[in-house]
Amino acid sequence: MNVKLGKEEKTERTMTTTILLLILVIAGLLTVPFITVGYVVFLLNAIFLYVILALSWNLISGFCGYLSFGHHAFFGIGAYAGALAIVRLGLSPYLSAILAGVIAMLAAIAVGFPILRLRGAYFVIATLCLAGAAQTLMANWKGLTGGSEGLSLPPAYNLPQYYYSVLVTMLVAIFVMYKIKNSSIGLALHAIHEDEDAAEACGVDTTKWKVFAFAVSAFFPGVVGSLYAWYMTYIDPPSVFNINILLNQMTMALFGGVGTVTGPIVGAIIFSLISEFLWANYPTVYQLIVGLIIVLVVVFMPEGLVGIFKRIRTPGEKVVRKKKIFKF
Amino acid sequence: MWELALVDVLQVVISGLLIGGVYAAIAIGLNIIFGVMGVINMAHGEFLMIGSYITYWVFILYGMNPYLSPIVVVPIVAVVGLVIYLTCVGPLMGKGHLPSLLSTFGVSIVLINIARILWTSEFRGILVRSIPFSCGGITIPSTTLFAFIAAIAMTGALRIFLDKTMIGKAIRATAQEMEGAMLVGINSNKIYALTFMLGCAVAGFGGVLISLLYPIYPEMGGSYTMISFLIVIMGGLGSLSGALVGGFILGLIQSFSSHFIGVAWESFIAFVFIIIILLLRPKGIIGRGL
């Protein structure tokens, strides 16, 4: 009894410290634009952007085990939807960001119902093709998108506004992912990841939760895509349907640890700093190193940084190395 | 008037079939690796790219006839494949499809960037004098015809290798029943390494053929990986004869859509087609079996 109480007290105390720490970090991040409007804000922005993207990719690929190779398409769709809402409909950037997120989500629901029936490698190929199809559609649908000439938006160089909107999106995304992970939905997704047929037999509505996860994982990239378009004031198909976006979000999630909430966040922060350093000093070998990191992570540390950290922290406990990180 | 349209259509059909045969040969490399090992080699197109570059360099530096270059290209690409297998694919065997898929995806990025650093992003091409054959208004460039014949010959040779030789039989046995094959004394690790080398060698051979027809640049591989996927999906993962049929269908679709709809929409149609095929027949049109 006493032991139990002690444990509860302890968890309560750690909870309060975590919440305090979180508030401190958020307050710190909120004040950054007041202190400096320069490189630091820019770097933080990139980190926030990738935290959102890595978390989104992780929701469908890490939680569900459905490896999406077309997630950069949702960023692109969001960018185009947001840009068109601003240019054609004259909506405010925030409203168009939410609209873009909803459109990306609707696109995910529309393609999700058919393609989420495919499993393993077949799903990977289908998502890869969908992203390619979306990009060619945007590049060729000249009446709507201006084709490969791109789309120009009214100039709105306002770094603090952009910073705050991405920050808020990131906090919402982290909150949503955390809530999903620690709810019955998270359990359902985990069951789908482990054994979909068994989950279905146990009464989990697998189609519903898969499409739900896919839709949520498309919403956030849509929002940040729109914000990105608004900030950059010019988009064209190669820049917003860039395969590098997919590469980065995937590498970050893998690097940090797939299937967790902290993993992609840690991965995004560390990897953003690494890639910033590489871009600044060795731009020619940047992609080469990204590719190498993917190979090394998959071969040597499939649980990512978070998994390694866990193993170091609990040396007595024998951490059973997961045989299958990805389902098939 | 009608006669002209008929000749036009015939021309499109023939060029579609010719290029389709080449695509089919390329896809067999991907297919054999999947059929035996259950590995989806995302770096397939990059092995092809390496093959093309080697063909280009032995042609430029040593004046080697591109028609003879498979003698050099195939062993080199096979050795590269062996190195990749030992470092990036072998340790992941038996862990499901997706880890090796991710790992080979990383390999493809590494190979593209090595090519960029070594040879720049410049478009290169081999200028082989192509003598067009004309017959009743239909013209066939000799390079395309040669590539087609070589592709079909390679497919046939591979078929005979798999059916008649001991190693080929061991590969097929491993594909059908890995544990059973181990019971009768087949070393599955060796077979896997050999299969991966074989698949990469096929890609390298495809690279020689492609270098005769299309420009060479570091990012060229991606589209051939996609094409191979498409063919393999149509023919069924693991099926060799299915790949040939899939290749012909794809070649026809490609030549018809680029001739009648426009080159810009060609890839869009291909992508949508893959998705439709995947949804309708997830096991492929023809079925499976090596």
Image (cartoon, rainbow, N blue to C red):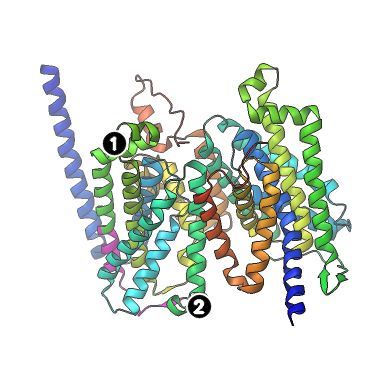
The percent position of residue A96, horizontal first and vertical second, equals 29, 70
Work out how far the residue at label 1 is from the one at label 2, CA to CA, in angstroms.
Answer: 46 Å
Residue range in magenta is A148-168
Q: Residue at x 36, y 50 (%)?
A: A214
Question: Which residue is label 1 attached to?
Answer: A187
Mark 1 Cα-neighbour bin, 10 Å: few <14, some 14–19, many ≥20 = some
Task: List x then y, in percent, for residue A285.
Answer: 58, 54
Letter of the chain that mark 2 sits on in the rendering: A
Amino acid type of the residue that numbered disc 1 sits on in the rendered structure: Leu
Q: Where does the image place residue A299, in percent across and percent down from the top left?
A: 53, 35
Magenta span includes A322? no
Determine the residue positioned at 80% across, 62% down. B144
Q: Which residue is at the front of the view, B174 or B190?
A: B174
What amino acid is found at the position of numbered circle 2 in the picture? Glu
Q: Quadrant of residue B184?
A: top right
Image quadrant where one finds the N terminus of chain A = top left
Q: Residue at x 65, y 55 (%)?
A: B224
Select label 1 or label 2 by which is in front: 1
> Vertical placement of A52 versus B257: above or below?
above
First of labels 1, 2 by sequence position: 2
- From this view, report whether residue B195 is shown above or below residue A246: above
Q: Mark 1, chain letter?
A: A
Asked if residue B189 lies left or right of residue B138, the reply is left
Q: Residue A149: which numbered mark, if any?
A: 2
Q: Secondary structure at mark 1?
A: helix
